[in-house]
Image: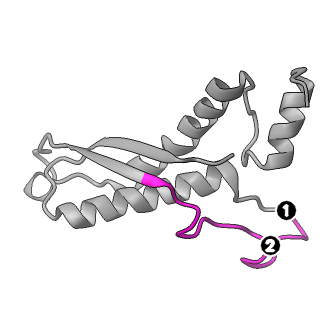
Amino acid sequence: VKVRRIAAAHDVGRAINPTQVEGQIHGGIAQGLGLALMEEYIPGRTENLHDYLIPTVGDVPEIEVIFVEDPEPLGPYGAKGIGEPALIPTAPAIFGAIHHATGVRMHFAPATPHRVREALLKAGVPK
């Protein structure tokens, strides 16, 4: 699975430092991408970052960030936390895109090549 582009619209409250807010969103998306496609702990076999894959700069696609600014009255200067909200929807969105492209639903993360192939074969999609 190759993710080519991600558009992410997030309610950031008030973006006090837009560059930093955008960086938080990029980081959350990278984590969600890893969760969806790469990161897998296998007991007894995953002992280091050679075995446990995480996204690198070459794995992260073009990201379009859209700020929705609705100041939070209880946040500092109207700001809201944004790191986790960027992470949470990324993996489900990627799984939705896999379903849209193939008609197959993935039920386990990560959607590694062998898991996607198994799901396609199980669904009767020709080789």
**Quarter containing the C terminus:** top right
Residue 53 is one of the magenta-drawn residues: yes
**Farthest-out residue, front:** 127
> Where 76 sits versus 1, above or below?
below
Locate residue 23, reporting x and y percent.
Answer: 33, 64
Residue 23 is one of the magenta-drawn residues: no
Q: Amino acid at mark 1?
A: Ile
User: How much space separates mark 1 and mark 2, taking CA atoms?
Assistant: 9 Å
Mark 2 secondary-structure assignment: loop
Q: Which mark is residue 52?
A: none
Locate residue 29, reporting x and y percent.
Answer: 47, 54
* Picture quadrant of residue 9: top left
Mark 1 secondary-structure assignment: loop
* Residue for point 39% across, 42% down: 7
Residue contact at pointers 1 and 2, CB within 8 angstroms: yes
Q: Report the predominant secondary structure element of the magenta stretch.
A: loop
The residue singled out by tag 1 in the image is: 42
- Which residues fall within the magenta stretch? 43-62
The residue singled out by tag 2 in the image is: 51
Horizontal side of 32 relative to 12 (left or right) equals right
Horizontal side of 89 relative to 21 (left or right) equals right
* Residue for point 86% across, 23% down: 125
* Residue for point 64% across, 66% down: 54
